[in-house]
Amino acid sequence: MKTRILYGKPVAEKIIRKLARTVDEITKQNIRPPGLGIIHAGFDPASRIYIKNKQQVAQASGFYVEILEPDNENQLFDAIEYMNRSSQIDGFIVQLPLPPLWNIDAVLEKIEPSKDADGFHPLNSGRIMAGQNGILPATPAGILSLLAYYGISTSGKHVVIAGRSRIVGRPLSVWLSANHPQGNATVTLIHSRTLNPENYIRQADIFVSAVGKPHIWKLKHFKPGAVVVDVGINRCGERLCGDVDSEGLEGFVSAITPVPGGVGPMTVASLIRNVWLLYKRYFLATPGFFNNGKTGV
Ligand code: GUN
């Protein structure tokens, strides 16, 4: 069996190119461009790199971008209020992780749901949970687009997801188990307290790892022919590496995403698309956007 490498870059570039063309057509009519806000609270060095990347891709697509860097929790709430009120910003994110002991739930609840580009506000995660069209967080949305691009259907498949974060595992598990064309999977969500995770992973037609631990899953964990989606971005010495050790997987699994260059670029493209969707819904006010039977992703 030839193992397919599911590169994210060409897929992300296709999404971005299409968005950039549409934004260009709009701004030529003297309508303001979509605006992305990013709040970077805390001092996580990896976050700085991710934010720079999001900023560059959004600006290259013709989006307006504004970044705020609050130093403490009060300033963070002020920054959220500023983004909530700004007439230039259609969607914004508070980059995670926050510094230890900051109240993440209180922070996410302050985001105006109609500007919630991450889909982390309880109203938006509730919409996904209820099967309503809403904003799906960028990483799950990116994974769905990647699978769709490579013609990998989830319907009837056993998808095993490792990691239950609000960023990836939880929303993805809900979305994939729902009754719609990009779902209809049988989903198992495993996590740090799961006993004998290999018992589940070995049954996976599609395995998604979002645990952030370098090379913890190896050849012995997988079923032959499985599709492996590696969301992990970890440091392995000087290099970046995923959660999955690809040693021996060539010819054994049917497809695998590379790290870097797999899910990462898809996340950025999906975030920018989420801002576009919010802009279209709340600024351009296309009638029936959330209720037109489309997924919104
Ligand atoms: N940190 C890692 N991934 C994400 C994401 O998708 N959104 C936010 N806000 N923070 C992150």
Image (tube, rainbow, N blue to C red):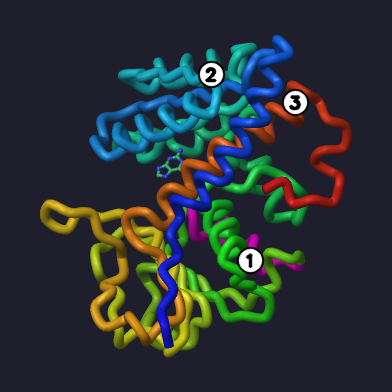
Q: Is residue 220 left or right of residue 111?
A: left
Q: Amino acid at mark 1?
A: Leu
Image height of 108 relative to 187, above or below: above
Precedes in sequence: disc 2 or disc 3: 2
Left or right placement of residue 44 versus residue 13 in this view: left
**Horizontal and vertical percent position of residue 213:** 27, 62
Quadrant that contains the N terminus: bottom left
User: Label 1 vs label 2: CA separation?
Assistant: 32 Å
* Residue shown at the point (59%, 61%) measured from the top left: 149
Of the numbered discs 3 and 1, the one sitting upstream in the chain is 1
Label 3, label 1: how many angstroms apart (C-alpha)? 27 Å
Nearer the observer: mark 2 or 3; the answer is 2
Span of residues in magenta? 167-179
Judging by the rendered image, the residue that carries numbered circle 2 is 64
Q: Quadrant of residue 118?
A: top right
Can residue 120 be seen by looking at this rendering? no
Quarter location, residue 91: top right
- SS for dot 1: helix
Of labels 1 and 2, earlier in sequence is 2
In the rendered image, residue 101, in percent from the top left (x then y), is placed at 32, 37
> Where ligand 1 lies, by image quadrant?
top left
Residue at point 33% right, 80% down? 250
Residue 114 in magenta?
no
Badge 3 marks a residue whose secondary structure is helix
Q: Give the residue type at disc 3.
A: Tyr
> Which label belongs to residue 56?
none
Q: Number of callouts in the render?
A: 3
Dot 3, how many residues are within 10 Å of its Cα: few (below 14), some (14-19), or many (20+)?
Answer: some
Residue 176 has which mark? Answer: 1
Label 3 sits on residue:
282
Q: Secondary structure at mark 2?
A: strand
